[in-house]
Image (cartoon, coloured by chain):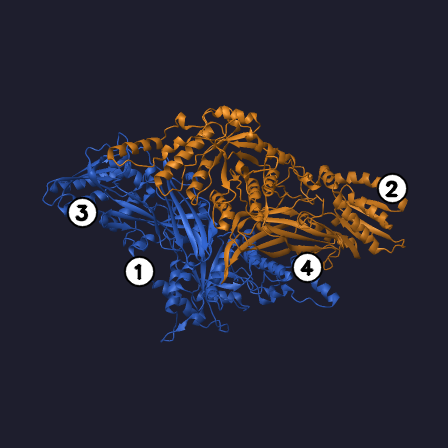
Chain colours: A blue, B orange
Amino acid sequence: MSDSNDTPPIQQNVAVGYWGANENPKVNHIISHIRNIGYEFIVLPVSRSSFSRVLFESTPEDEETKQVFLRNMEEWRAGIPFSREELCLQSAESLEVAVGLTSPWIDLDSTDSRIRTNSEIALRQEFAWAIYLGIGTVMIHPPKSEFCNYARTVWSIINGTGHPSVWMQLPLTLDSDEPRKKETGSWEQWTKFRTLCSHDTRLGIALYITADLPSEKVLERWIAEPVRAVIIPTDIFLINAKGYPVLSKKHQSLVRSFLKLGVNFVIRDSKTDREENDSTVDIYMQYIRYMNRSGPELNEREKFATGYQDYLQSPLQPLMDNLEYSIYETFEKDRVKYILYEQAVHRALLDRVPSDSDEITVIVVAGAGRGPLVTRSLKAAEKANRKVRVYAVEKNPNAFVTLVNTISLQNMKAQVWDDNVTIAFSDIRRWNAPEKADILVSELLGSFGDNELSPECLDGAQKFLKPDGISIPSSYTAFIAPLSSAKLFAEAAMHRDWEMPYVVMFHACTQLASPKSVWTFEHPNRLLTVDEQGNPITNYHNVRYSKVTFDLAENGILHGFAGYFDCVLYKDIKMSIHPERHSTGMFSWFPIFFPLKEPIHLPRETCIEAHFWRLTSQSKVWYEWAVDCSISTIHENVPVNVSVIHNPNGRSYWIGC
Amino acid sequence: MSDSNDTPPIQQNVAVGYWGANENPKVNHIISHIRNIGYEFIVLPVSRSSFSRVLFESTPEDEETKQVFLRNMEEWRAGIPFSREELCLQSAESLEVAVGLTSPWIDLDSTDSRIRTNSEIALRQEFAWAIYLGIGTVMIHPPKSEFCNYARTVWSIINGTGHPSVWMQLPLTLDSDEPRKKETGSWEQWTKFRTLCSHDTRLGIALYITADLPSEKVLERWIAEPVRAVIIPTDIFLINAKGYPVLSKKHQSLVRSFLKLGVNFVIRDSKTDREENDSTVDIYMQYIRYMNRSGPELNEREKFATGYQDYLQSPLQPLMDNLEYSIYETFEKDRVKYILYEQAVHRALLDRVPSDSDEITVIVVAGAGRGPLVTRSLKAAEKANRKVRVYAVEKNPNAFVTLVNTISLQNMKAQVWDDNVTIAFSDIRRWNAPEKADILVSELLGSFGDNELSPECLDGAQKFLKPDGISIPSSYTAFIAPLSSAKLFAEAAMHRDWEMPYVVMFHACTQLASPKSVWTFEHPNRLLTVDEQGNPITNYHNVRYSKVTFDLAENGILHGFAGYFDCVLYKDIKMSIHPERHSTGMFSWFPIFFPLKEPIHLPRETCIEAHFWRLTSQSKVWYEWAVDCSISTIHENVPVNVSVIHNPNGRSYWIGC
């Protein structure tokens, strides 16, 4: 569960832009035309190709001319403004819809120091001009094979100017004969570039879709990156039977993935000689809009998740805080979950009491909230034709008020079957039970299973469970999977806390391997050692430690771990948020995310060894986590990287008990 | 140059301790005996082996006994204190000389969770007891093959307790048949352990010297680690002809290295049955003390460096700040440097003026300070039998006062040779020269050559140099080398600044490869483009960028880069702090250290690609640096790690000009 009271960000319709990267002098005219036909924005070069003169590439041979030439260069370097003819973006009119594009001839990693220096000055001048005009986004060119100085310059500009948003063009595939380089080369350049720039969140991607697409796995990686715009060149369109341009199935699927992420789209006309009033350019925009409208319908879970994608929430602390009405309201709507509980109670009653018996089964609902599990338990009893006496225990004084009303109604109906319900206002661990229970029903699980202290609560309730009593749930298991997501890393950076898990609906994320289990809790705990009052003497039996290894074939970047749970309610009645067997339609839990302080680069064939701890003191429970990566060569295991241990002593995050 | 006014830390004599790790009940007696025979401290176990009962290893079969057994365990876990019989260190008497030793049976990475949990409680109890007694240092046992949970527990204790100093025992070589594991396995365990513990500076090493020694290269690595104590077991001693115990030559050399580092020594008696008043144990202590006294005499440079080893200093900012009297005083003592300058001026005069000529050579000393280069220039002229007119220009008003006095004396003497000296109070870049110079002499170099803005100053002075004039120095080159040093990393951590270079005398450091050059400055700069006043129009010509690669055979950890310079004063008269050709006896410069924010693990056969920039704006000069590491496999270059770009825009460190 997570606190759904936070306001989620609002999803927008797709914004489609037009790539107007040409030297046409009538810029204002183009802008208004493009706007008229329905584009939201336009990409336009900041300056014209004539500005490339500032590279001062060829030095004259003759000594005197050379001196003049060098002096001209120095004077330009000292700060000569653009001439009007050199500028493409000129007046500030309509420029709120413009994205500035820097010049393609700028070469920051030339071996010639003069070209490097002048390129840097030119790039800064273009940025300065865009910022002066109030253009919020500047698009830059893809990195060349060497790009360290380019990365330094771009990061310096981002740090030093009025915080523009920078989109770096990156082709989806590289032009290379080596299949690996062609497929992943662009992503590798990107991941090095952004690491040099300290994962600065102002640096995003404008992904240039190529006709050739890489494998599904490589496409997935891009989903986990901060793609701000997708550039669609018109020459990747095919012509269908009716003569209209359409995208291939694979390209369509890719476009849909990015539409779901709410990124911008840019149509880049591959025909450079088209008349400006040629209406062909509308068709591509219309096509993208059509795809956005015609996406598959959202299922229940997707509807519930809308707006919460990649939105980090602090996990609930239901033991320390009292939940609000609206949270109960939201989660009670999850029919799938409550049907599973009803089935579990039903099966347990059938197993426990012979069909012809008059025996009354005592059911205790621990943490009854506003009463949904009471209702479901009574329904199960009715269906099973078994007599029950139900105790509903709740510690939240506010929920208790609603519970009293619910139960009054239930009791009136219950007369019919001799069943009755007693309510108690108490923390389950301190409840003075009037009789021992046959069945203890609870819904205390968090996204990671035990992270809302279900083990501690149920240990405390065990004293009033009969020796052969049943707990529903009877066990739950936590799972982790290595996760790549620049988006979640950036979100955690905004929270300035990498030492706590977050509840989050994964979206722009790539899971690098299937989840693996870390630990399990079983109830009742037959090995529990208790004091005279029946309470556990210590909580050390709820400490867990697990080392889990993941072998990766491909390279990647690790930002943290996804967490899930599997739960056995009763025998084969199971409930799960494990992505490979998620209970269909259940929406009560988003997964959990354990971030890493520093992203870790994973070469191919890395073995990730994840260490997870669940630790306790007298008053709190917390997690710690660390990761140790190595690659196996023929002879040995080569350590690649080891992280620090996160959240030592629960210093940044803990759950009070 | 560095600011020698900071007070350096004081070096201490060697402290030798005795390993009293036995179960002898008369602890106070042993302590006073050991102190009486001259040991400074003693290592003693916190508890006795009987305390190992708390592992509760074997559970009774019989159900009732089992319940009692488990209840006893839970009660101990809930917090039962030590019994008196379980403790070795008991009263606080004389305990200021004790180092506590934790129990060897503690096993934090057992596959049995009960042993893990109880081991953690036991270790915490031992630490708590040591802290209660006021024992400042606790020694812990070496890691086993798995140690993540051990690392977590130790770091948790360090973070949570009264900040004790922890010494982790580590054998110099591991007991293994694999040569590589035997040699470097222990270091690899350590480097992973301390990374998990976030490079916490409270965690140090007690290095256990084994009879087998690893190669010289592996020994060097340990020098770069935070070794707090060296444990010498007595069975590595040989018996010499006279029947006395002595160490092998190689062991002696190792001990000397650590004596230089000022670490503690611990004698561990390999005979466990020795009588406590057996005087043999004195011999080993005496031997270490003898080695400490009989080390080779310090040379001039070492004497000067005493107390400055691994002590980080901010580089001087001579252009922005005025140096103090004492700094001039210190650096003027460097005879080697001034002899080289005198030779350079002498050679330049011989080359420039025929022996029979009456021509007067104009020498300008830029930044004359208190006058040493004036004196040396006049001496050179006398030796060369050439006439000179000297201008001494100085911007520091305080040094100028001393300069006036020096020059008055010189002028009196100078009458003899017709030479004379004129002094001017001015920044050399703004000096109104009465005539053009033949020779411009300056000593503006920093540890990295150009880092005290010699290029900018000499560019500004070039306008009064004759077209064929000579600059002494005529060129200088900066060098970098990858450096491993937990000590320097820890020092930078204390300064909380990894984005600035530090001037430092390297000591506990390992240079991972030979230095390579990054860039060169030449004077006069024949390509300088100047304005009407003869001043450079911009400073872009002093921008530098260099990519340097280092191929490493062995694994290691990278903490930053060492910086040095080579300088050509005139033709073959050179001056250098490059470690492979350091000008003998010259002490004016310590090297410079460019730290990394995060240490980088280097697998074997890593290629380190270092990127260094020298950047300028109108008012300042700064460096930026980044590193990109990869390993070459058969098929491709596998990226291992890339750092962030350090000090973007000079945000943390810059030199004002």
Kindly check if marks 2 and 4 are in contact, taking CB atoms under 8 A apart as contact.
no
Name the amino acid, label 2: Lys
> Residues under labels 4 and 3: Cα distance?
86 Å
Badge 2 and badge 4 in a common chain:
no
Asked whether, in this view, residue B168 is left or right of residue A6, the answer is right
Residue that carries the numbered disc 1 in the rendered image: A297
Image coordinates for residue B237, horizontal then vertical, percent: 56, 38
Question: Which sits earlier in the primary sequence, circle 4 or circle 3?
Answer: 4
Image coordinates for residue A264, horizontal then vertical, percent: 43, 60
Residue drawn at x 41%, y 50% is A609
> Residues under labels 3 and 2: Cα distance?
115 Å
Considering the numbered disc 3 on the image, is that residue within a helix, a strand or a loop?
Answer: helix
Name the amino acid, label 4: Glu
Residue A16 — which label?
A: none
Name the amino acid, label 3: His
Residue A435 occupies quadrant: top left
